[in-house]
Amino acid sequence: QKEVEQNSGPLSVPEGAIASLNCTYSDRGSQSFFWYRQYSGKSPELIMFIYSNGDKEDGRFTAQLNKASQYVSLLIRDSQPSDSATYLCAVKGVGNTGKLIFGQGTTLQVKP
Amino acid sequence: DADVTQTPRNRITKTGKRIMLECSQTKGHDRMYWYRQDPGLGLQLIYYSFDVKDINKGEISDGYSVSRQAQAKFSLSLESAIPNQTALYFCATSDQSGGSYNEQFFGPGTRLTVL
């Protein structure tokens, strides 16, 4: 079992819809959870992080964390074609090592 | 100017050649990382460094070596390149603040092709 798992997709949604991206992790001691967006051929950029159970909202983005189920998700409301990218889930483990474990990424396609 | 820079941005080399990828940062961060990315595999950690005297292996260090020349510079070397090292390579940095939040900032990447 991979430490961080994502469905590689592609996930296709129509413009204006809600896109739901999911991620599971195996280390129950994981502390922090990150969502990076990566456009094709570009570097990853952080869009959300969360470390407490529940929801965290930032504009059109909502991150949801359920530590009991070892599950983190990203919701994108009012999806736009410019949201089309690969979304990487990353997990920081116990301690202050700074290391992140990345999932393989989910490709999102928003169709006009 | 970009906070994290990588050189070269693209490189084509031949099997058996030695190649060095360089990373520089102006963010003042102590921690630096090297990742490789293959299609459909996300980012895999090659090496990471917490300061100039602290170098650690990541998930896939075989065939690679690194040098932390200064706080701001972290180089990745392939001593004898092989075709399955063809990939996109990213350098990243983070600060050493404690606690849960530890964002990593990525350079623009180096696309390496080994023929």
Image (tube, coloured by chain):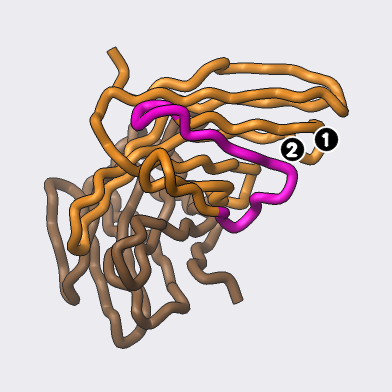
Image quadrant where residue A92 sits: bottom left
What residue is disc 1 on? B82
Q: In the image, what residue occupies the spot 16% across and 68% down?
A: A55
User: Distance between the Cα atoms at labels 2 and 1?
Assistant: 6 Å
Question: Where B79 falls versus A65 (above or below)?
Answer: above
Residue type of the residue flagged with mark 2: Gln
On screen, residue B23 versus residue B80, left or right, reads left
Is the Cβ of the residue at disc 2 closer than 8 Å to that at disc 1? yes
For the N terminus of chain A, the quadrant is bottom right
In the structure shown, which secondary structural element does the residue marked by tag 2 occupy? helix
Badge 2 crowding class, 10 Å Cα cut-off, few under 14, some 14 to 19, many 20 or more, is some
Residue A19 position within the rendered picture, expressed as x and y whole percent measured from the top left: 34, 55
Instruction: Tell if the residue under mark 2 belongs to the same chain as the one under mark 1.
Output: yes
Q: Provide the chain ID for the residue under circle 2.
A: B
On screen, residue B5 versus residue A7, left or right, reads left
| Picture colour for chain A | brown
Residue A60, numbered circle: none
What span is colored magenta in the figure?
A: B57-73
Evaluate whether residue A109 shows in this view.
no
Residue B39 position within the rendered picture, expressed as x and y whole percent measured from the top left: 64, 43
Residue type of the residue flagged with mark 1: Ile
Q: Is residue B68 magenta?
A: yes
Image quadrant where residue A57 sits: bottom left
Front-most of residues A32 and B97: B97
Taking the view exactly as shown, the residue that stands out farthest to the bottom is A68
Q: Which chain is drawn using orange?
A: B
What residue is disc 2 on? B85
